[in-house]
Image (tube, rainbow, N blue to C red):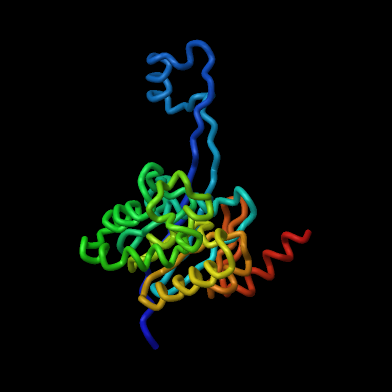
Amino acid sequence: MAERVPTIVADNANVVYRIVGRTTPGTGSPLASFKRIVTGTKSAAIREVHAVKGVSFIAYRGEAIGLIGSNGSGKSTLLRAIAGLLPVEPGGAVYAAGQPSLLGVNAALMNDLSGERNVVLGCLAMGMTPAEVKAGTKDIIDFSGINERGDFSSLPMRTYSSGMAARLRFSIAAAKKHDVLLIDEALATGDAKFRRRSEQRVRDLRAEAGTVFLVSHSEQSIRDTCERTIWLESGVIRADGATEDVLQEYEAYMRK
């Protein structure tokens, strides 16, 4: 039996958003702030939102893991914590083998540059060599399908629909082998043909010994892509196991 190699370990991970509201007169002064530091008290103007609560799991190389849950359940927050973009509260931790790469529908592309130029810059930013970028640019554009109705790759990104931009983001991120690829709703965009291509690419990434996390509201995409699924609800893991078992439990919960 092949050894299972961990790529992500979440150990009692908690993520808290601290939202600063309007202060009452006198509470925002330097003296008042110093008193709060000395006494350890919190400002009444700071509201805390506990988005991820005590999450623990181990992800292994070669796994594709779905993340499901109702809106506001903490799925995207957990992805950002895994990627190192959000801090985990003291007492818990997220450990990663290599650098996880987060792909979301809001991933940054430069609107004033052409799609082709964004492909080049995105690939260079991921660490690909200029020779690799030159060799792969056409394949990335073809995979995205943005030129199926004209030469959009030469036009500024601001002329793209949201679906076209999301498909290009996914195509850029999927062009490189990743130790851990985190995908937030990116497969929900585009037509059925693109979804089939993107789902196959996720399977290819797994075969290349990577680990893929997929957040999606499309239960069919989760079924087609992931053999394991984690269900988050109100920041807490409700279930973690075989995709079909977890989805059946989740669907029964949503029908209540």
Q: In this rendered view, identify the residue nearer to me: 181 or 157.
A: 157
Position of residue 40 measured from the top left corner of the image (x, y, whole percent): 43, 28
Q: Residue at x 53, y 57 (%)?
A: 185
The residue drawn where x is 41% and y is 43% is 111
117 lies left or right of 56? left
Percent coordinates x, y for residue 170 in the rendering: 44, 60
At a point 64% along the width and 74% down the height, the residue shown is 245
- Is residue 100 something that shows in the picture? yes
Q: Is residue 83 left or right of residue 160?
A: left
Q: Nearer the viewer, residue 16 or 70?
A: 70
Q: Quadrant of the C terminus?
A: bottom right
Indicate the quadrant where residue 232 lies: bottom right
Question: Dividing the image into 4 quarters, which one contains the N terminus?
Answer: bottom left
Q: Examine the rendered structure and indicate whether residue 94 appears above or below residue 109.
A: below
Residue found farthest to the front: 150
Picture coordinates of residue 234 (x, y %)? 61, 50
Query: Is residue 58 at all visible to an observer of this figure?
Result: no
**Residue 119 picture quarter:** bottom left
Residue drawn at (71%, 65%), measured in percent from left and top?
A: 251
